[in-house]
Amino acid sequence: MNTSIDQVTDSEILSVFDDKHYASLAKANHDNYVNNNPYPHIVIDNFLPEKIAKTLIADYPTVETFDASWKYHDNQNTRRYFLDDATKFKFRLRLFATAVNSRSFLSFLETISGIEALYGDPYFIGGGAMLTGTGGFLNIHADFNFHHKLQSWRRLNALFYLTPNWNKDWGGDLELWTTDGKQKVKSVEPVFNRLVVFTTTSKTFHGQPEPLKCPDDVFRRVFSAFYYASKKDEESENDPHFTKYNVQQSPYSAKILEDYKNS
């Protein structure tokens, strides 16, 4: 039965991860997480209570509200919008942003991943409320490994997919690649209310490289939260680095060179 978003209280959103269901879910999926290929990760469907997921849809930013507080990247590596300043979110989405940095959700992530002493990023650097429209993409890459503001090592990503009625013909799959960045291992559809969590190192290559084919008024919406620790993963490089794109696997980079050669 569908539940009206008006029935969702602020407290329900803020305390959503206090439900013991999430502790059980984390314990039950720990082995699956650490043993998954090509690197530790998990995909969980229907992750949030339906009424909360619907509330987040209603409060999610839209491109019609685009202003100077947003970021828009349009280059050979990516084309997408995102709003990382939680003070600009509508109130209930801002409550959710607090919940994903809460003690309960951090405990969930530590339990499922086995990574100790995680903490969230209140700045949502590189993440937050993300929107990708038709033609948008994100090339295969390994994430930046160090948060200069927090002076901490990046360890884990949590992605909440929030576009209802996504049509698989539109594309938009998250691709997980081998740790040498040469071959795709898995594709994950951006199904509504799906959570994807994965460990991040200098070798965890991933992205959404195929340009979207959705209608002009539909956007791939994913709320992205990243997590850090004072201890570095042994797979991460010792020196801090920015996002590392795999240029060889970029159709846009290849086309730039092809156009140049044929000019």
Image (spheres, grey):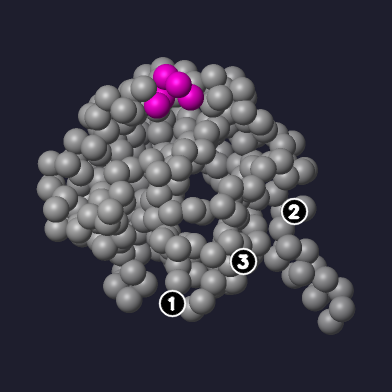
Count of numbered circles in the view:
3
Amino acid at dot 2: Gln
Q: Quadrant of the C terminus?
A: bottom right
Q: In the picture shown, does residue 72 fall above or below 113?
A: below
Q: Amino acid at mark 3?
A: Asp
Question: Which residue corresponds to mark 1?
Answer: 217
**Image marks 2 and 1: residues in contact by CB distance under 8 Å:** no
Q: Secondary structure at mark 1?
A: loop
State the mark number for residue 169: 3
Amino acid under label 1? Asp
Which stretch appears magenta? 25-29
Q: Residue 108: give x, y in percent of width and height.
A: 36, 26
Q: CA distance from mark 2 to mark 1?
A: 29 Å
Of circles 3 and 2, the one toward us is: 3
Label 3 to label 2, Cα distance in Å? 22 Å
Give percent across and percent down for residue 83: 35, 59
Q: Name the chief secondary structure element in magenta.
A: helix
Q: Residue at x 55, y 32 (%)?
A: 41
Foreground of the two, 137 or 54: 54
Mark found first going from the N terminus, 2 or 1 = 1
- The quarter of the picture where residue 84 lies is bottom left
Residue 240 in sight in this render: no
Which residue lies at the image location 59% right of the left edge and 20% below the top edge? 234
Q: Which mark is residue 249?
A: 2
Mark 1 vs 3, N-terminal side: 3
**Is residue 141 left or right of 31 when viewed as pictured?**
right
Give the residue at the far bottom of this rendering: 263
Q: Is residue 88 above or below residue 242?
A: below
Sequence-wise, the earlier of marks 3 and 2 is 3
Asked if disc 1 and disc 3 are in contact, CB closer than 8 Å, the reply is no
In terms of depth relative to the viewer, which is nearer, 20 or 208?
A: 20
